[in-house]
């Protein structure tokens, strides 16, 4: 009998522990997330894709904005995974670097804009929940630093990947093909511009 | 070249009514987007139908040549990318509509949890999806009708003039404001129900098991030495960014998310100092998006050559930038 009781207690105890952590996640994260998501969806609708597109095209011209402002706007406004579609405004040789830069921002962005990658928020929420529990004062600083360091990291990623892409184009003997792409781009032929 | 129709049923735990696909001379590519290589399911579809299986991770194929895409996404991103383009999609994992592109994942073009056993030569019944062009035409016609109605309404409002016009446009603005908020709320709730709560349920169960059986202490003892000093963290950053590992670790950020929750618990329990939270966030996520490079690039409408150069460029770049990111985060964490 003792064995059965012992087993039953452990069995229920296991699920009770799981249920407790579920309650914690639901009450701790969901309410804030739901209102934030609602607000962000509304704001992105109001601003509209057209205006964003113009800002993004401008940002794509200079290396420093191409791997900071451009991916930030893309990720916040179009969210993961549609944000990568803004790569179409760039010349071919810069597309891999833009992708690398944008995809690396889809987690730091969740510190303030969880709607941008709501399907994967637990990288940030998981770690930060621990910080919130033990040192609530440090939570806001952690969020800000994650966001800021994220921006620095995507800039570095963009620059490094652009450099490596250039290297691979040369080494792989693709130079001529990419020169053609560049010429087409300079002539105003943006891939997929459907107007 | 002779082609044959194949039927694909959903597998155990899968979703969707099943697909019947027939290759044509224009659409005869089975695109395997499964982190490199041709998945057995893609190979089986190609073999039975007479189409050609192509590794979408290293090759870029124009969308209009693709008969169907085979993906391995249990997450929320890739799962919707091909349905959004109305390309029939076969998921080898038990995926369901979820994530930001859930609305595009419909029963007529998506089936999941498929193994080679679910692929067979179709019987007599051959149904072909309505060609995309006619669907687009229908949508355009609808839109045109709507625009015309709108123009008419505006015209009427203009005729009214003065005060009435003011009231009408004020009402319109308020209506737009409220309706946007309402639909945003609906969108948020849908996402929470389809994507976030299911994740919470499975993570809670995992955490319950891990903490109740004291495995968490065991994991903590194992990982803490690695995560509790800057060199270990940088090493972790390098490991997650190894070009062979990174595409495997990537999908749905599933692994990074579970590790994130576990690390958070360790920090919450005081086993790890708060200062390490920031570098940990970067160390466990050096692989972010490495499984998604070809898809991400094709979303940016990249040329085939760009994809073939871009995949190795991103993977190798990570090996350099991932440890740099951890180091930067470690230095910045002194400000916490």
Image (cartoon, grey):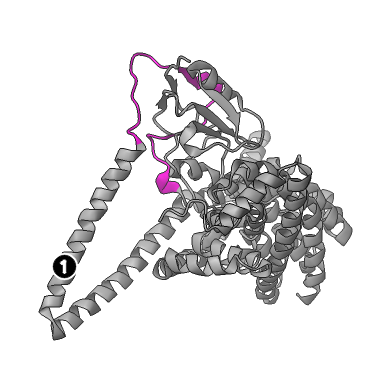
Q: Is residue B260 visible?
A: yes
Question: Hey, which quadrant is residue B20 in on the image?
Answer: top left
* B23 horizontally vs B268: left or right: left
**In magenta stretch: residue A185:** no
**In magenta stretch: residue B113:** yes
Note whether B274 is above or below B233 in the view shown. below
Q: Position of residue B134 (x, y in %)?
A: 30, 39
Magenta-colored span: B102-131
Determine the main secondary structure of the stretch shown in magenta: loop
Q: Position of residue B225 (x, y in %)?
A: 87, 54
Q: Which residue is mark 1?
A: B153
Q: Position of residue A126 (x, y in %)?
A: 65, 58
Note whether B108 is above or below B261 in the view shown. above
* B6 horizontally vs B145: left or right: right
* A28 horizontally vs B231: left or right: left
What element does badge 1 sit on? helix
């Amino acid at each position: 009998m003792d064995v059965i009781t012992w087993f039953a207690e452990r069995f229920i105890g296991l699920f009770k522990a799981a249920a407790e952590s579920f309650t914690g996640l639901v009450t701790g994260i969901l309410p804030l997330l739901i209102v934030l998501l609602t607000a962000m969806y509304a704001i992105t609708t109001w601003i509209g894709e057209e205006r964003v597109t113009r800002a993004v095209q401008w940002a794509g011209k200079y290396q420093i904005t191409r791997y900071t402002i451009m991916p930030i706007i893309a990720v916040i406004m179009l969210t993961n995974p549609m944000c990568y579609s803004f790569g179409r405004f760039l010349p071919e040789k810069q597309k891999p670097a833009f992708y690398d830069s944008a995809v690396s921002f889809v987690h730091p962005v969740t510190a303030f804009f969880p709607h941008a990658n709501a399907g994967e928020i637990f990288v940030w929420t998981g770690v930060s929940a621990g910080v919130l529990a033990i040192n609530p004062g440090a939570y806001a600083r952690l969020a800000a630093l994650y966001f800021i360091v994220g921006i620095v990291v995507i800039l570095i990623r963009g620059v490094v990947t652009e450099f490596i892409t250039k290297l691979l184009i040369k080494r792989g003997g693709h130079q001529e093909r990419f020169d053609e792409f560049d010429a087409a781009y300079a002539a105003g032929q943006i891939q997929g511009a459907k107007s | 070249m002779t082609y044959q129709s194949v039927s694909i049923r959903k597998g155990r735990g899968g979703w969707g009514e099943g697909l019947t696909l027939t290759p044509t001379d224009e659409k005869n590519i089975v695109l395997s987007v499964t982190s490199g290589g041709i998945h057995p399911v893609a190979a089986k579809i190609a073999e039975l139908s007479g189409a050609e299986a192509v590794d979408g991770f290293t090759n870029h194929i124009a969308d209009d040549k693709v008969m169907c895409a085979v993906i391995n996404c249990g997450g929320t991103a890739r799962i919707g990318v091909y349905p959004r383009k109305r390309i029939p999609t076969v998921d080898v994992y038990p995926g369901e509509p979820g994530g930001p592109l859930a609305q595009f994942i419909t029963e007529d073009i998506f089936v999941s949890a498929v193994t080679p056993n679910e692929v067979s030569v179709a019987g007599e019944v051959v149904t072909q999806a309505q060609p995309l062009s006619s669907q687009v035409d229908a949508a355009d016609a609808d839109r045109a009708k709507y625009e015309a109605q709108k123009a008419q309404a505006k015209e009427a409002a203009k005729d009214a003039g003065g005060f009435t016009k003011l009231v009408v446009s004020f009402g319109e603005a308020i209506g737009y404001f409220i309706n946007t908020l309402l639909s945003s709320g609906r969108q948020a709730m849908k996402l929470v129900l389809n994507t976030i709560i299911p994740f919470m349920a499975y993570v809670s169960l995992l955490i319950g098991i891990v903490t109740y059986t004291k495995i968490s202490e065991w994991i903590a003892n194992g990982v803490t030495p690695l995560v509790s000093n800057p060199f270990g963290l940088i090493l972790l950053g390098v490991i997650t960014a190894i070009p062979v590992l990174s595409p495997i670790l990537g999908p749905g950020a599933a692994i990074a998310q579970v590790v994130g929750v576990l690390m958070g618990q360790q920090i919450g329990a005081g086993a790890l100092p708060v200062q390490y939270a920031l570098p940990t966030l970067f160390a466990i996520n050096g692989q972010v998006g490495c499984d998604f490079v070809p898809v991400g690039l094709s979303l940016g409408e990249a040329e085939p050559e760009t994809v073939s150069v871009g995949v190795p460029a991103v993977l190798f770049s990570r090996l350099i930038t991932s440890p740099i990111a951890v180091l930067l985060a470690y230095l910045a964490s002194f400000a916490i």
